[in-house]
Structures are given as structure tokens and as C-alpha cells.
Image (spheres, helix red, strand yellow):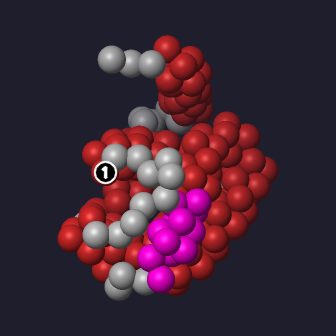
Amino acid sequence: MIDGGACRVTAPVLDTIAHVTADSAANDTTSLWPAAVALTVCLAACLGAASFGALFPPGQWYAGLEKPALNPPNWLFGPVWTGLYILMAIAAWLVWQRRGAAPVALPLTIFGVQLVINAAWSWIFFGLHRPGLALADIIVLVLAIVVTMIAFGAVRPVASLLLVPYLLWVCFASYLNFGLWRLNP
């Protein structure tokens, strides 16, 4: 079942993507091939970060930890992160689309750096069992997401807006990480 609120958010995003694609077709008389390749690369990068994180499942160690209030069920994390990674890829792709009209190398580099910081969290938390170090990583990640949003907003404001759910979820994850660190010395 799809939440009506999600549809209200998704419809403008899909309209924007359709508009960008139509603009690309009008401006690029040869084909949409470069845009399709760029979208594929953005999706591969984001889903690659997700796949790296999946190498470090919660396991028995995590199951034995005392959880903070508001800790969601484990099954929720996969679908939420999948949606967030797809939004992140679309945001990066929208910035890439502006490559002739605006400098995009720096914003996309910043995006790549925050993606590495994102991927490192699962390794630190679940792989190394280091909630304190993971907390430091996630605080840096929040800051990196904000910097990415600012950089994306200067090139393509809608790309920055697509990162808002990601920022909110990582802030919530920061609360969970802090709680896990405090509750499990």
C-alpha cells in the first residue's frame, strides 16, 4: 500500500525527472544515451555503497545490544535505505545534467566523499563493533550531507531537496547510534 503523503512527494520528483529528460532531448539532438549512462553510473555508485554496507549485517552482536527508544524493526532499514540511495542517485544525476551550464565537478566530488563516509559507517558499526567510532563517522556524515546539499542547491535546487529525506534519516540514525553507544558501554 502506498502512503498518500509519499505520492505527493514522489509525483513532483517524477515530473522533474521527466522535464529534465525532455529538456535533454530538446538540447541534445543526437540521443539521450549520455544521460542514460550518467544515471546508470549514479545508481551504480549509490547502490554500490549500499552493497558494501550489506557486507556487514547486524548479526548476533547487534541483536544482543540494548536498543534506544524509537528503535525501528530491523526489516524497515532495507527498504528505507534503498529508497534513499535511489533519491541520492537521482539528485547526483540532476546535478550532472547541468554540466554545460554550471560547474558540477566540485559538487559531485563532495557527493562522492559523503558516499564513502556513508559506506564506512556499516563497516565501523557492524563490522568492527565500534558504536563510538561509528557515532563520530555519522556526525561527519551529517555535516557532509549538509555541504552536499548546499553544493547541489547552487547547481540544481531540486537536487538538494531530494537529499532532505536522506538528511532526516541520517539524523534519526545518529540518535539511534548515540543511544546504542550510551546504552552499551
Whether the magenta-drawn stretch holds residue 46 is answered as: no
Look at the picture and state if 47 lies above or below 28.
below
Answer with the quarter of the image where residue 129 lies: bottom left
Magenta stretch: dominant secondary structure: helix
* Residue located 41% across and 47% down the image: 72
* Circle 1 residue: 74
Locate residue 15, reporting x and y percent.
Answer: 55, 20
Closest to the observer: 60 or 97?
A: 60
Q: Residue furthest left?
A: 60
* Residue located 49% across and 59% down the image: 68
Look at the picture and state if 136 lies above or below 86.
below
Locate residue 179, reporting x and y percent.
Answer: 54, 66
At mark 1, the secondary structure is: helix
Q: How many marks?
A: 1
Look at the picture and state if 98 lies above or below 123.
above
Closest to the observer: 18 or 27?
A: 18
* Residue located 57% across and 53% down the image: 172
Answer with the quarter of the image where residue 79 lies: top left
49 left or right of 60 in image: right
Q: Can the viewer see residue 49 in this picture? A: no
Locate residue 55, reporting x and y percent.
Answer: 24, 70
Locate residue 25, reporting x and y percent.
Answer: 51, 29
What range of the chain is rendered magenta?
174-185
Which amino acid type corresponds to the residue marked 1 in the rendered image?
Answer: Asn
Which quadrant of the rendered structure holds the N terminus? top left
Q: Can the viewer see residue 64 in this picture? A: yes
Classed neighbour count for the residue bearing mark 1: other residues with Cα under 10 Å, few (<14), some (14–19), many (≥20)? few
* Residue located 57% across and 69% down the image: 178
Answer with the quarter of the image where residue 49 lies: bottom left
Q: Residue furthest top?
A: 4
